[in-house]
Amino acid sequence: MSLTSKSEERVRSSVLKIKPYVPGKPIEEVRRELGLTDVIKLASNENPLGASPKAIEAVREAASAVHLYPDGSCHELRRALAKKLDVSGESIVFGCGSDESIRLVAETFVGPGDEVLFGEITFSQYEFVTHVAGGTCVTVPMKNMQLDLKAMRERVTPRTKLVYIANPNNPTGLMVPKSELDAFIDSLPDHVTVVLDEAYYEYVTSSEYPDSIPDYVKKGRNVIAMRTFSKIYGLAGLRVGYLVAKPELAQAIERVRPPFNVGSLAQAAAIAALEDTEHVERSRSLNESEKQFLYSRLTALGVDYLESHANFILLDVKRPAKEVFEKLLRRGVVVRSADVFGLDTWLRVTVGTREQNERFLTEFSACIRGD
């Protein structure tokens, strides 16, 4: 719904610049709108294996106490995560998913006149939170669909406060290798903080991928590592993410964190999920094998794609992606049209189970043949 002119007069000008986020369609919405019963969702990069059984059991056990406010400090989760990451508890800040973590950082460091840099094709929340904070967005063109750190460095000014780098990047799935990231971070002036959004960290298998916490955070660099339990841990519906930074940065961010922002069920599930390393390994292994399966079948179909370091694949359908998206939707397959990222002929498809992937390929083949 559009705002009326009178409403616009009441609203901050920076808020009027915000483009509302468009999420992947929920399965129930597709069933309701199209009258379908058999629907698969490969749109939001969720773990097709679901959450760890241990996490689900932890939620059941914690459910009897939902009438009580959660532990606002996330004490037990903080202790478990600090041990796993080998960092101090005061270096961790918890958020209601990565979305809130991204926003907390902007609210802490960005004000009117401050500049925030990010790639032209990347996660839309960086632009969103910059406008909310009243800052100025500086979008940097990509180079061969990759984040161009040299171009980013050239755009840094005395007004630059933050640089958001999604690694691997969403929606491309491409990563910035350690050598490039090292050089970029080393070149920055002290007033710039780099935010490494590593939502897909656990899926990366490349030896060239940086390990941001020991490589940068624990060395006292102006770097914030941001991760989530929504992807490989399968807890997207519970909304729990976190960031790790040197204590003086983390404690500044902690000042703007809302009380009780991570619910008690989410905390219990996250603790259990951390302990289930077998589920994480199985999820990573499935993702790697199924990516190779999809690559081989897409190649046979003559479809161009980017080799991904995450749990999704960006592919070029050489026609308006929205049309293919709608055709797939009517066939009960929910994917993501990348036109929301400015890529009008590309689709982003989550890597699913073999059954889901075969279903997608069958329906996709029919769509591009014109059946």
Image (cartoon, grey):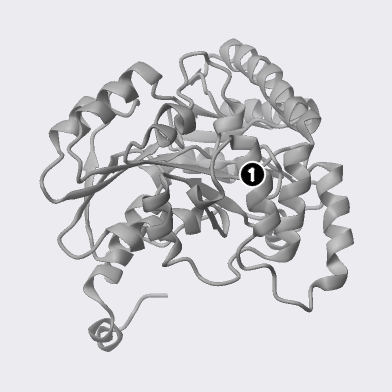
Nearer to the camera, 104 or 131: 104
Q: Which amino acid is tagged 1?
A: Leu
Quarter of the image with the C terminus is top right
Residue 91, position as x, y percentages in the image: 49, 48
Q: Say what secondary structure mark 1 lies in.
A: helix
Quarter of the image with the N terminus is bottom left
Inspect this view and state whether residue 89 appears. Answer: yes
Give the number of marks.
1
Residue where numbered disc 1 is placed: 81
Nearer to the camera, 292 or 328: 292
Residue 365, position as x, y percentages in the image: 64, 25
Nearer to the camera, 221 or 35: 221
Residue 104, position as x, y percentages in the image: 42, 60
Nearer to the camera, 321 or 221: 221
- Residue depicted at x 60% and y 16%: 295
Q: In the rendered view, does 83 fall on the left or right side of 147? A: right
Q: In the rendered view, does 38 fall on the left or right side of 210? A: right
Q: Is residue 347 above or below residue 243?
A: above
Q: In the rendered view, does 65 fall on the left or right side of 100? A: right
Q: Is residue 277 above or below residue 340?
A: above
For disc 1, the neighbor class at 10 Å (few under 14, some 14 to 19, many from 20) is many
Inspect this view and state whether residue 24 appears. Answer: no
Determine the image quadrant of residue 175.
Answer: top left
Q: Is residue 234 above or below residue 263?
A: above
